[in-house]
Amino acid sequence: MTNLRYNYFPGCSLERNAEAYHKSSMAIAGPLGLEFAEIDDWNCCGATEYISLHMLASYAIIARNLAQAARNSPDNGQASAHDLVAPCSACYLNLSKCDKYMRTDTDLAEKVNLALAAGGLSYKPGSVHVRHLLDVVVNDVGSSKIKAQVTRPLKGLRVAPYYGCLISRPGLRTDEHDPEYPTSLDDLLECLGAEVVDFPLKTHCCGGHMTQISEGTGFELIRQLVKGAADYHADMIVTVCPMCQLNLDAFQSAMNRYFKTTYHVPVLYFTQMMGLAFGQNAVTLGIGAELVDARPALAKIGVEVPPPPEAEGAPKRKRDDKSLPMPKMSKQADAATREAKP
Amino acid sequence: MAEGAPSVPERLSFLDEVQARTPGESRLLMCIQCGTCGGSCPSGADMQHTPRHIFAMIRADMREEVLSSNTPWYCVSCYYCTVRCPQDVHITDIMYTLKRMSLVGHSYDSSTAPDFSKMFINWVENYGRAFELGLMSQHMLRHNPLGVFKIADMGIGMVTKGRMAFTPKRIQGMAGLKQIIAKAKELEETHD
């Protein structure tokens, strides 16, 4: 069987903050028969920031990536040859929106090409087909092939499928699906053996950059989502976007402090869940980089993740001698009480 | 008009200007004031005017009131309103247009959100890539220095888990990218 080949646009987040997403995407590619070729010297898509300041320049920098991808097309003669895959929902939205607007607004296309020409490039609208990684996994690989790879079903794990806003929306997709209540990620996670929660907030926004602009606004959106998942007794939220992961995971403790709550809902990428179900090693999948500890949830499916180096050994108490007399528990007794808790 | 009175320079109405500065068709004129947008908006509660209200204000030529409002800067760009609008008004795109227009005359008096965008694109314009650590520390130091302590555990967590780069990455084709950006900005200005 020949592999399906795609151009790949990782985006800035996947280089560092969401490296786990990149690692796990690469790890599942092999078993699924997917090959990804990173496009040459790509630049930032501008997220939601560039377009807030400059209209034409924002489309021009996005189009530079489309131009690079068009030059880079793997010539294997397959339908996927001109497909550009983005795992990041913001990159996916920007790239596909730019292509669509250039197709429908000839004035915009002309001006963007004038700008590109200054850098020795050009882009013919419609020559690159932008797709999100979830779409490729669900529609090009398909459930039967995915099921065939499952060696460690995610049995007993309750997951909240979280699509976020940007892949679900604005009719930019070629495959029409429900912009408010998609089910492809639900089906995929079921395929992996997980117990999928019917998550009503599945396409609600995580707030994007709002934590940096207005804490109250940003944290409230994070709270709703984390609470939503917790209310449905989900062991974890499964996401398809690095911005959603960052907000729900890295800002969860700050959100808890802000609202005086104690939520603990780990947030992993769908590619990590696939890798786990395929029996892959947790560390290869970048598991352990999340700030909300996913180990207790993963223990349910028998996955052991080595503890982070700084957590090894008990913390040293400086004031041991002078502190108030407190009952000290032996390690075994401590472990027993922990287990006894519901 | 009395003879000899200074001629009024021809100027686009605010409504025309918003439409002209939005790529493609904004469909702003199609708004039927149903309020689906505001009802769907995740940050609507924190906006001074809901999107529906803003559209009525644009049609009423209330330029200053619209451009000084926090509404566009509180748009989280989730496109919920856009997919739900029964009239297919390109609401998110219009919010971006309003953000850009509000910066021209410095109408919006809070610099927190505009500065975030400016700092973000500064990294892109000089390196070709975003740089999270640089952006967040720069922005927090200017707008919320005490916030650094509040999220210190997060920052330490991100660093110890290897999720923060300490140096930005520069793309090879930086010279070309700069030329593309310069040309686009020049074209955008001549369009005005």
Image: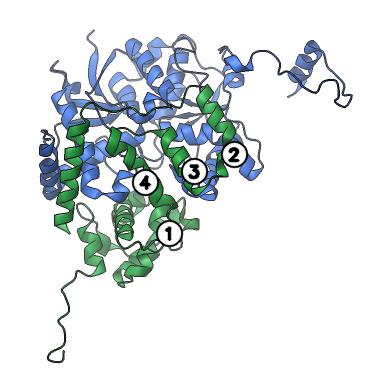
Chain colours: A blue, B green
Please state the chain letter of the residue tagged with numbered disc 1 in the rendered image.
B
Give whichever of discs 3 and 2 has the lower sequence position.
3
Q: Which residue is mark 1?
A: B70
Q: Which residue is mark 2?
A: B149
Q: Is residue A176 visible?
A: no
Give whichever of discs 1 and 2 has the lower sequence position.
1
Residue A233, compared with residue B26, is above or below; it is: above
Residues tagged 1 and 3 counted as in contact (Cβ below 8 A): no
Mark whose residue sits in front, 1 or 2: 2
Residue type at mark 4: give it: Ser
Give whichever of discs 1 and 3 has the lower sequence position.
1
Residue A245, compared with residue A255, is above or below; it is: above
Q: Residue at x 33, y 22 (%)?
A: A137
In the image, taking residue A216 as reference, residue A51 lies left or right, namely left
Instruction: Measure the alpha-carbon separation of dots 3 and 2.
Output: 10 Å
Circle 4 SS class: helix
Q: Are marks 3 and 4 on the same chain?
A: yes
Pointer 4 local density, CA inside 10 Å: few below 14, some 14–19, many at least 20: many
